[in-house]
Image: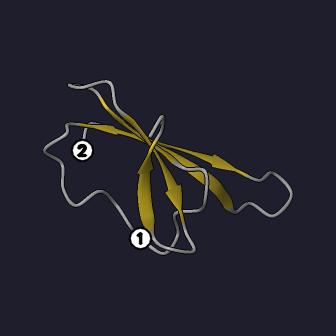
Amino acid sequence: MIRILDAYDVVTDQVKYFEFAGLSTDTPKPTDSNISTGSVFTEVDTGDVYLYDEVSATWNKVGE
């Protein structure tokens, strides 16, 4: 994993979503229970972008 950014809700001081950047070989991608729907993982070596769905705990490639 190269980079992790997070965004907090200023009212509740809870994490709203994360932005991850890493290599396509970084598997498995994070699935911690703190990660919320809409979090983003960008593969810096391929340019592929994935959005997280917390209900199914899966990363879905954008554009497919």
Quadrant for residue 61, please give it: top left
Q: Residues within 10 Å of mark 2 (few under 14, many from 20)?
A: some
Q: Earlier in the sequence, mark 1 or mark 2?
A: 2
The N terminus is located in which quarter?
top left
Element class at badge 1: loop
Neighbours of disc 1 within 10 Å: few (<14), some (14-19), many (20+): few
Residue at the extreme right of the image, as rendered: 11
Q: Is residue 13 left or right of residue 61?
A: right
> Residue 50 at what x, y percent from top left?
43, 43
Amino acid on which the number 2 mark rests in the picture: Met
The amino acid on which the numbered mark 1 sits, given as a three-letter code, is Asp
Q: Nearer the viewer, residue 13 or 3?
A: 3
Residue 1 image label: 2
Q: Is residue 44 above or below residue 35?
A: above
Image quarter for residue 14? bottom right
Position of residue 54 measured from the top left corner of the image (x, y, whole percent): 55, 69
Total marks placed: 2
Q: Quadrant of residue 42?
A: top left
Colouring convention used in this rendered image of the protein:
secondary structure
On the rendered structure, is 15 left or right of 39? right
11 or 56: nearer the viewer: 56
Q: Secondary structure at mark 2?
A: loop
* Quadrant the C terminus occupies: top left
**Vertical relation: 44 (above or below) 20:** above
Residue 4 percent location from the top left of the image: 41, 43
Q: Look at mark 1 in the image and give the residue it sits on.
A: 32
Q: Is residue 39 left or right of residue 41?
A: right
Camera-nearest residue between 43 and 7? 43
- Image x and y of residue 37, in percent: 61, 59
> Residue at coordinates 19% horizontally, 39% vertically from top-left?
24
